[in-house]
Image (cartoon, rainbow, N blue to C red):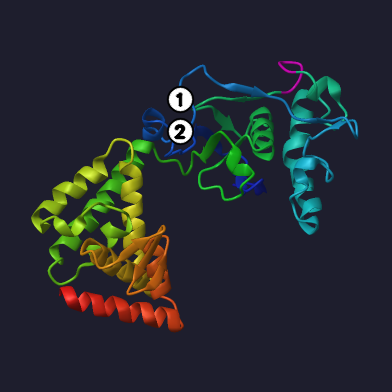
Amino acid sequence: MSEKKTFKVANTDITIGNRYTIVGKPDMDAPKGFAEFETSKYLMTGIGEVHSIPFDSSINCYDTSFDEDSASNASIPREERASLVKLYQTNIQKPYETRFKKKLDSMNDDFWGEMGEEGFQITLYPEREFDTSKPKDLLELFQALKKGLVCEKGEKDHLLQRAKYCIVDNNKKQSLRERRAYDKAQAFVTLGNLIKDIDSDDSLYSILEWINFPNARNIQPENLMTNVSIFFDNPTTGQKNCEKFMEAFDSLEKPERKLEMEYFSALAKLRHQNKLEYKKSQWYINKHLLGNTIKAGAQLAAGKGKIADDIRKAIQEELETID
């Protein structure tokens, strides 16, 4: 059995033969109904978008991405561009031309300039599946990625982030319900273990304060499980809350991040005891500037140099007044 061909399109690795599905793009700032289903678009059958590829009148050709000088290839490093475009031509362009007896050169207005059965169009809608063993689906997915119409979840490139939809490889796909169940189970198990050790280890308080869970230290340990469970079960932000909780827990394994979280927890405790001063949108401890936020002060305290030494000393002195 021959090995499947995999290559990069935009920032996504595409494996020919795999199936890819359009899913909602996570948007936690969206209205409740959208955020709950991790999308900024309506997830309704029949509602979609149709796109063509750009035409550059200055050079009288279409941006097919099959030429090294195609505008959509400009971001590819020059030393990589020729070999990658060759892969596009061999694995996407030529199979389509062979199957449908069409020429995909950048000046073919009869193909790129026409939409529908005679020409080319990119059709996007929720749950649309691209079967990359089919030349037509592969070409549409390729163009959608190259033109920034879809991207993977977690895309870091600021231009590609503007895509309205995300895609997932079905070989790696896990349903939203399954993923939420796993994340929630992981968060609950971790929460239970931390509560067991809360008398000797206050890491749980550090985590909860770090993720802005309100008044964690004012809640009796026996009530924490219930209160945090409600936090995890929030229909709109629960998924994100579980993720933030586990990210903060994992950070405790990193010495520099753990120190920052510990100082943040100490400063939060001092703020609750009115031991910090807030004026002109800045926080102070014993006249030492912490910054605009308590987290900024924690970062300073975890650093090096005289300012960090002074802030750490001030934190210790104030803690001793309330212990």
61 part of magenta stretch = no
Evaluate whether residue 257 shows in this view: no
Q: Position of residue 302 (x, y in %)?
A: 40, 75
The CA span between labels 1 and 2 is 8 Å
- Left or right: residue 301 compared with residue 20: left
> Do tag 1 and tag 2 residues touch (Cβ < 8 Å)?
yes
**In the displayed structure, would residue 191 be above or below residue 24?**
below
Q: Which residue is mark 1?
A: 43
Please give the range of residues in magenta: 115-120
Between 45 and 71, the one lying in front of the other is 71
Residue 190 found in image quarter? bottom left
User: At 36% from the left edge and 46% from the top edge, which residue is drawn?
Assistant: 240
- Of the residues shown, which amino acid type is indicated by label 2? Thr
| Residue positioned most to the front | 280
Task: Quarter of the image for the C terminus: give it.
Answer: bottom left
- Of the residues shown, which amino acid type is indicated by label 1? Leu
Helix, strand or loop: magenta stretch:
loop
Q: Secondary structure at mark 1?
A: loop
**In the displayed structure, would residue 111 be above or below residue 292?**
above
User: At 32% from the left edge and 65% from the top edge, which residue is drawn?
Assistant: 277
Q: Position of residue 9 (x, y in %)?
A: 67, 45
Q: Which residue is mark 2?
A: 39
Q: Position of residue 43 (x, y in %)?
A: 45, 25
118 part of magenta stretch = yes
**In the displayed structure, would residue 323 be above or below residue 208?**
below
